[in-house]
Each structure stands twice: as structure tokens, then as C-alpha cells.
Amino acid sequence: MTVQVPAILTSSPSIHRYEGNPVLDASKVPYNTALVFNAGVTKFKGKYVMVFRNDYGSLADQTIEPHHTTDLGIAFSDDGIHWEASPKKCFKLHDKEIIRAYDPRLTVIGDRCYMCFAVDTHHGIRGGIAVTDDFEEFEILSLSTPDLRNMVLFPEKIGGNYVRLERPFTVYSRGGQDRFDTWISESPDLKYWGNSDLLLAVEHVPFANDKVGPAAPPVKTDKGWLTTFHAVDIDPSRGKHGWEPAWKKRYTAGIMLLDLENPKKILGMYKQPLLAPETSYEIDGGFRNNVIFPGGMILEDNGEVKIYYGSADTIECLATAHVDDLISLCLKG
């Protein structure tokens, strides 16, 4: 039975949306695109870098699902607010088996930038990890078996191993329906992954009844790894909330704090959404409304946390908060 989540969810008062949202949309991209969202964002070699999902279908004809045609674009910024999209696309995987690559997540480890991504194939969804020094050439380090996605890397080794969060598709073992949870795995070399454990289950999150999974890569604080996650609730009574005949899901963003030395231990989790769909650009006029999905989080030297999120599967937006406030939310629950 589907657990009922409150019909109205609100964002934490600690979070502040950038008044100029969106920071990037189709109108600011110098090539054919319809939807710009679910970007990975980081600071790399003195620049803010955004690798975004570019769905290049048709905005004019909303009977066409543009996410069937997808690649990745790249944008740069000096301040993390004003972005300029490059005329050159960033990354594309396509062959007889791989249909498309999408949903990038960026993590700087040492002096290199690593990108997690998902690929649709003719035999399931796989998660991949690639590394780059210039966002022009990428070396693919690993591709998972199906079905796995929403992978994000921690920005340093922990206990001698690389660590990632991930969301497998555990349909059969979870009653034959969406009950997707967040897992955590380790690797000595970013290629071979194991020592996997459940980190956060759907039933642990009061504002989810469908799935929970990684969002932006974690950032390190003195108190622990500040970690966002996406949470999904489904209501069969929901009708048309986007271009599709029916869209019954709502995506919100949550936040938790993980132990620095043992990130398999949750020190605290905010029991309400950090970000819930509320503004006009989050709940109306998008491809899939009522969707918030963070893909990048940057901790600035002054304690400000920039959270970049896809809105309504259509545009890329920015919200900010102070790191101390976010930690306090997690520890107070």
C-alpha cells in the first residue's frame, strides 16, 4: 500500500532561492535545446563549472518527449551565479548498445575532476564514472551492471578507499514496485566497487513513499559530510502536472549529515524537506512539474552553501544557505 505523504510540503526557512532563477535555461544555450537541468556543478582550476543535461527535443510541440534525445553541455562562471554556456558540447556516449548518457555529477578529487553519469542501454540503466582534466577529453573508468544510477563520489578517500552513494533499482526484492533506497559502496581504484551497505531507505524519510537516492556530491564540514538526497512521493490521484498525460510523483530535496570517518553512519537527518516545489517555475509550465533535484553543492569560504538544482525537469536553479544552519537542521532533526 502506498504511504500517504502530506499534500503540502514546504521548504526549510534556512534555504533561500536566488531571486534571478533560473541561472541557466534553454534560452541561454547557443545550440538546439529544449530542457536544461540536473547539472553537476563544482569549482575546478579557479572556475565554477557546470555540466548540464541537454534534452534537445521541441519546446514548441509538447506532445514530443524531448528526453529521448539527450547529451551534455557545459557552462562556466566566475561567481557561480552568472553562467555562460559553451558553444561546444561536453560529453556524449552512443553506440549499438548505449542509447544516451545523462545526469552528470562532478567531484574534484586531488587535481582532477571526476564525473558520475547514467547511461540508458538496450539492456538496462548503468552508472558510469569518468575523469577529465579539461572537459574535452574524458577517460571512462567504470560502468556498472544494470540497474544502477544517481551515483555520486565523495571528494576524498575515506579509510583508504574511494566512496560513492548510489541508488539501485531493487524492484523484485521490494515487492515489485518502486521502493528505491540509497546505498553506499567503496573502491580501491574507482573501477571495482564493493563493501556495499544500505544507507538510507524510503521508510526512513517521512516525506517519501516511493524512492530516495543521492543528489549532489557530499561536502566536507568540521561536523561531518553534509549530504543532500532526493526524495519522491507518489499520489495516484494526481493528474496532469507537465507535458505527459499524467505525472503522479513529486520530487523534494532532503539533507543529512554523515560521519567523517565512517560515512555509513548517519549523524542526523532533517525530517522535513530542505527544498520542496513551491515557486511558479517549480510547479507550473515545466516538462514534469513538482520536481526539485539537486546535482551540485559548493561550500564557499564564507560559509555560504550554493545548491544547484534542476527544476521541473526544465531549468537549472540556485538556492543558498549558511553551512551552520544546514548542520543544525540535520542534528536537530
Image (cartoon, rainbow, N blue to C red):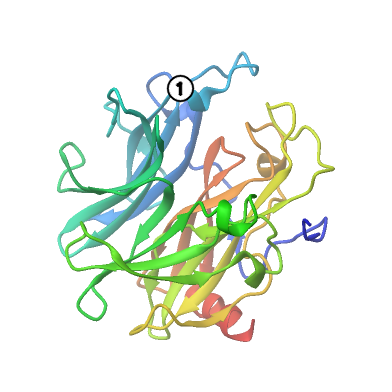
Q: Is residue 288 above or below residue 232?
A: above
Q: How many marks?
A: 1
Q: Quadrant of the N terminus?
A: bottom right
Question: In the image, is residue 333 above or below residue 132?
Answer: below
Question: What amino acid type should be assigned to the residue bearing mark 1?
Answer: Tyr
Asked if residue 48 shows in the view, the reply is no
- Left or right: 129, with 332 as reference point: left
Residue located at (38% from left, 85% from top): 222
Q: Position of residue 219 (x, y in %)?
A: 38, 70
SS of the residue at dot 1?
Answer: loop
Q: Residue 282, image x and y in percent? A: 66, 43
Whether residue 145 sits left or right of residue 189 in the image: it is: right
User: Residue visible at 81% across and 35% down?
Assistant: 239
Please name whichever residue, 326 or 240, is drawn nearer the observer in this view of the structure: 240
Q: Looking at the picture, tell me which residue is in the foreground, 19 or 332.
A: 332
Instruction: Locate the C terminus and report the quarter of the image it occupies.
Output: bottom right
Q: Residue at x 68, y 39 (%)?
A: 289
Residue 78 horizontal/vertical position (percent): 32, 49
From the viewer's side, name the closer residue of 3 and 291.
3
Q: Residue furthest top?
A: 61
Query: What residue sits right under mark 1 in the picture?
Result: 56
Query: Quarter of the image holding residue 94?
Result: top left
The answer to whether 86 is drawn above or below residue 31 in the figure is below
Question: What percent of the width, then of the height, locates residue 16?
Answer: 60, 61
- The structure residue drawn at horizontal position 45% and vertical position 82%, both measured from the top left corner, is 265
- Mark yes or no: residue 314 visible: yes
**Other residues around mark 1 within 10 Å, as few (<14) / some (14–19) / many (≥20):** many
**260 displayed left or right of 60:** left
Q: Is residue 297 left or right of residue 188?
A: right
